Amino acid sequence: MSPFPSQEQIAALKILVVGDVMLDRYWFGAVNRISPEAPVPIVKVTRKEDRLGGAANVARNCVALGAQASLIGLVGADEAGQSVQNLCGADGVDSALCIDTELPTILKLRILGRQQQLLRVDFEQEPSSEALAQLEQHFVRLVAEHHIVVLSDYAKGALTAVERLIQIAHQQGIPVLVDPKGDQYQRYRGAASITPNRIEMEQAVGRWSSEEDLTARAQQLRQDLGLEALLITRSEQGMTIYTAEGRSHAGAEAQEVFDVSGAGDTVLATLAVTRAAGLSWIEAMHWANKAGSIVVGKLGTSTVTAEELR
């Protein structure tokens, strides 16, 4: 396998990340008793932390690997949206965020006791057509300045017009990598690759009976969508990639799985950076697999650095 690209190679890369931007908020505390009001633990919060989530976590991971990353997405005119913008600045992400005054920033609040997640509360709603039009305008303005586009679809509405974004990038000759959602994969036609997880792949092509059956279904889907590569992330089974050359598999390398939050974002970012640096799809998959195996050993949405991979 080729070595991980050099620091100089990666520093010159520009990745454009577009999709559902979220704020991951963590409240950490101690649990010493059960509430007298209901059979639930009482968490005495001792620490609070905000981290970039969703598409913003993909961009953050690209920067952690040493690349330049621009982020296009939607936030509200609220405290959470301001936190997203502040974190982008702190993490070195060049943000071009569209502010929708009618939209709350997508927020995932996780409450943890003794490092164990006890509850997650989500705040979200569908974006307006005006905000989506503004997002497309930002995309048209920025896409040609980048080496590769990453579309991070969490089915929250930012990529409602994903077909149009892929078409614009295609016209500029910029390859597009997509982390898909749902079962309407025709929306992603013309992308260079998609990276569904095991459940998402099953939603798209149905349940398979064997590896041979999966290969046939995956290659058919890849050809139908005009993809160069289709990469399935398979948790404890590792990853499998399908290209015109055939099938290649990488076994899981994680020694201990602590938290899978955001692991797909790390995989997608690593795939984008290594592909933009000129590695083959199979080499890029192996590095993405290594990155995923590292990040699941960390708490919450986290990143992997090039130094850790090297």
Image: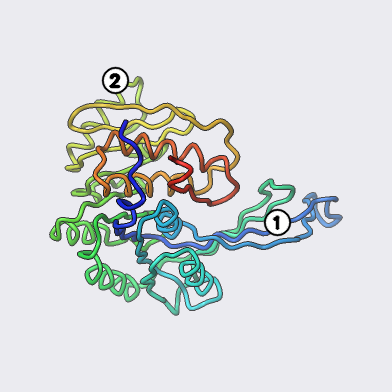
Residue sitting nearer the eye, 245 or 166:
245
Secondary structure under tag 2 reads helix
Image coordinates of residue 175 in percent, x first then y, are 21, 52
Q: Amino acid at mark 1?
A: Phe
Mark 2, other Cα within 10 Å: few <14 / some 14–19 / many ≥20: few
Above-or-below relation of 199 to 72: above
Q: Quadrant of the N terminus?
A: top left
Residue at image point 24% right, 26% down: 216
Image coordinates of residue 42 in percent, x first then y, are 79, 55
Above-or-below relation of 76 to 194: below
Give the CA separation, mark 2 to mark 1: 45 Å
Secondary structure under tag 1 reads strand
Q: Quadrant of residue 310?
A: top left
| Mark 1 lies on residue | 28
Image coordinates of residue 69 in percent, x first then y, are 36, 61
| Mark 2 lies on residue | 212
Instruction: Give the number of the disc on residue 177.
Output: none
Closer to the eye: label 2 or 1: 1
Residue at image point 30% right, 34% down: 2
